[in-house]
């Protein structure tokens, strides 16, 4: 198989609100690869738990969340209007509902439950089995696909990430506080890096992308140069 035909797995890890999904989606579109938003999958489980009462008053009841795992169906369907896939939970469109601050405040605790991670990692590994995928999340290059041919680790200043998240939510009409958003960003960083199961960490062979002061176009130009050099190996 020639280099032009060869397809690889691209793992995009990093902190919350770094634009991982947007960037990974753009990479997939540029390369003709499949994009898989693993963060959306954890948000989907969190939303499901909230709607089924397994999270009450901000408290995650782990045994109740685990009991729901066998009864949740998570699927992706391509949306031609967006040029990307939407996520569905039990057949219902959940793309907008999983992005709320309520879900953001609980998703790190749900993601830390070993049974949740085991189920979703198995699903993700099956999705990437044929390669030609761009997958983003917190542990793709370390736990899901440790042998991925190209790994990125994205980071940005917490204040910059909070402002981006604030702009995203207010654009959707949500009334939120920038201070609350920044607290959420920092709390999620702490939770993601300190959890016992598959904590967020940079894989030794990952390439760091700090996009605090980079435009989307600058990030893509940077990536394409990296991709070309990696495919020459």
Image: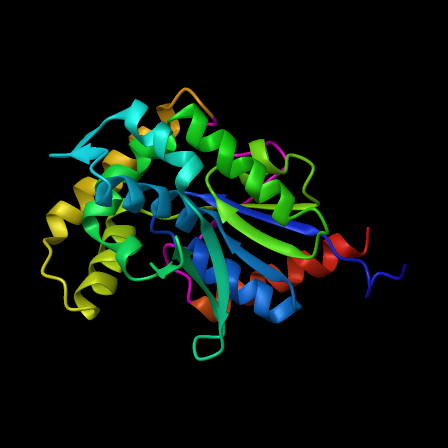
Q: Name the spot of residue 72 as percent of width and height, x first.
A: 41, 43
Question: Residue at 11% across / 34% down in the picture?
Answer: 57
Question: Given the current orientation, which residue lies at the most extreme top position?
Answer: 196
Q: Name the spot of residue 214 as percent of width and height, x first.
A: 42, 62
Q: Is residue 79 left or right of residue 112?
A: right
Question: Residue at 43% across / 47% down in the picture?
Answer: 41
Question: Can the viewer see residue 37?
Answer: yes
Question: Residue at 18% across / 48% down in the picture?
Answer: 181
Question: Given the current orientation, which residue lies at the most extreme front position?
Answer: 71
Residue 201 painted magenta? yes
Which range is magenta? 198-215
**Residue 183 position by quadrant:** top left
Quarter of the image for the N terminus: give it.
Answer: bottom right
Q: Is residue 216 left or right of residue 212?
A: right
Depth order, front residue of 145/72: 72
Question: Residue at 61% across / 70% down in the picture?
Answer: 30
Q: Name the spot of residue 3 as percent of width and height, x first.
A: 84, 61
Question: Can the viewer see residue 189?
Answer: no
Depth order, front residue of 51/6: 51
């Amino acid at each position: 198989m020639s280099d032009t035909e060869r397809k690889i797995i691209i793992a995009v890890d990093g902190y919350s609100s770094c634009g991982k999904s947007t960037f990974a989606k753009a990479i997939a579109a540029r390369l003709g690869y499949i994009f898989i938003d693993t963060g959306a999958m954890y948000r989907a489980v969190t939303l499901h738990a909230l709607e089924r009462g397994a999270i009450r008053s901000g408290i995650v009841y782990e045994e109740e969340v685990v009991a729901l795992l066998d009864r949740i169906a998570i699927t992706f369907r391509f949306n031609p209007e967006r040029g990307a896939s939407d996520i569905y939970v039990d057949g219902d469109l959940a793309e907008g509902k999983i992005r709320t601050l309520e879900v953001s405040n609980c998703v790190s605790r749900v993601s830390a439950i070993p049974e949740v991670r085991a189920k979703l990692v198995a699903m993700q590994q099956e999705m990437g089995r044929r390669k030609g995928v761009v997958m983003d999340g917190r542990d793709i290059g370390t736990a899901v696909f440790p042998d991925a041919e190209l790994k990125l680790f994205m980071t940005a200043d917490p204040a910059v990430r909070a402002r981006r998240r604030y702009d995203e939510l207010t654009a959707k009409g949500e009334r939120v506080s920038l201070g609350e958003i920044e607290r959420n960003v920092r709390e999620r960083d702490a939770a993601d890096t300190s959890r016992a199961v598959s904590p967020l960490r940079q894989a030794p062979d990952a390439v760091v992308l700090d996009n605090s002061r980079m435009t989307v176009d600058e990030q893509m130009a940077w990536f394409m140069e990296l991709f070309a050099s990696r495919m020459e190996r």
